[in-house]
Amino acid sequence: MAKSGFVAIVGRPNAGKSTLLNRLVGEKVAIVSVVPQTTRNQIRGVVNGPEGQIVFIDTPGIHRPLHRLNQRMMKMVHAALEGLDLVLLIVDASLPFGEGDRFVLNLLREKNLPSFLLLNKIDQIKKADLLPLIARYANELSWLEVIPVSALTGENVDLLLKRIFAALREGPSYFSQDEYTDQPERILAAEFIREKIMHHTREEVPHSVAVILEKFEEGERLVRIYASILVERDSQKGILIGQKGRMLKQIGTDARWELERLLNTKVYLELFVKVRPHWRDNEAVLDEIGIAKIRS
Ligand SMILES: Nc1nc2c(ncn2[C@@H]2O[C@H](COP(=O)(O)OP(=O)(O)OP(=O)(O)O)[C@@H](O)[C@H]2O)c(=O)[nH]1
Ligand SMILES: [Mg+2]
């Protein structure tokens, strides 16, 4: 009989959760950036193998929420930890253990789920430096497995998959074989645009941006996409548009390239920048951009 299960990927912001999800699935289902708090939703990615099917759930990085947006993000982490077969805690092994790590461990201990510890970014450290970190984590939880990985290079990711299948029980497939994510193309498209904005901006700007897909018109040889970019201040709008519109043009060019790959067709992309003060604390906007509201 085939195996199956739901496996959540959790950890602090920037640990490499989304990079790992993409690596496991072999497709880009979650956007990635150097800026912490990139992922804002739960994102499912599906892996099918001879042993069965794994549904991975990428989650927002665990942090102290300062806006309603971030409160919703943290509720999504809690929700993702319900009804699971396995949790992968992913930590950035190139960083020292800190308060945030303690907070995450306490949360996982509370949930009392079968857990793997993944020490990520081993391409950035000396192997010998792993030992103290492994010792640091060893008695915090009864880990089923402790696996050093590099989500970026793929080191040990095949081994990880094998160990996950070994830990899962027999069960049905939840997704059909050709579905690799639960995210509709429109959501992926908005996310890909947001990723390009995150790559080109810094400090508070990446966090202050949301992308709303206004129109998605499928023609015979072309998809027309019109998207609004929300920012919180006029100064941020200025940054995004740039001198003579250069920044917005660059973002559009980068995004269009990626959208054409996603949709496998030519894309016409138009971007509009709008100022919505304090949208991160505005429940109506959060509903509109699809940040799930989860009742607790
Ligand atoms: N060197 C190295 N960098 C990595 C590795 N995995 C992820 N990164 C980088 O770490 C940064 C954060 O990666 P993400 O995948 O966005 O991290 P995340 O945990 O999803 O972050 P949030 O969504 O903000 O919680 C990016 O710049 C990645 O390229 C790795 O194994 N090695
Ligand atoms: Mg992420």
Image: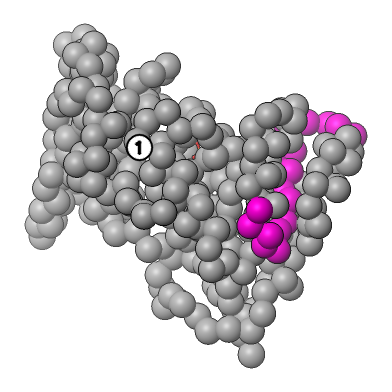
| Residue 255 seen in render | no
Q: Position of residue 71 (x, y in %)?
A: 41, 39
Compared to residue 174, the image places residue 6 above or below, namely above
Q: Residue at x 68, y 60 (%)?
A: 112
Quadrant, the N terminus: bottom right
Q: Position of residue 134 (x, y in %)?
A: 84, 42
Callout 1 secondary element: helix
Q: Position of residue 272 (x, y in %)?
A: 14, 30
Q: Which residues are magenta?
A: 110-129
Quadrant, the C terminus: bottom left
Compared to residue 22, the image places residue 119 above or below, namely above
Q: Amino acid at mark 1?
A: Leu
Residue under label 1? 69
Give yes or no for residue 150 being in the magenta stretch: no
Colour scheme in use: one colour
| For residue 22, side relative to residue 117 (left or right) | left
| For residue 211, side relative to residue 78 (left or right) | left
Q: Position of residue 55 (x, y in %)?
A: 52, 67
Compared to residue 196, the image places residue 60 above or below, namely below
Q: Residue at x 17, y 39 (%)?
A: 227
- What is the number of callouts on the image? 1
Q: In the depicted view, which residue is nearer to us: 267 or 127?
A: 127
Q: In the depicted view, which residue is nearer to us: 268 or 179?
A: 179
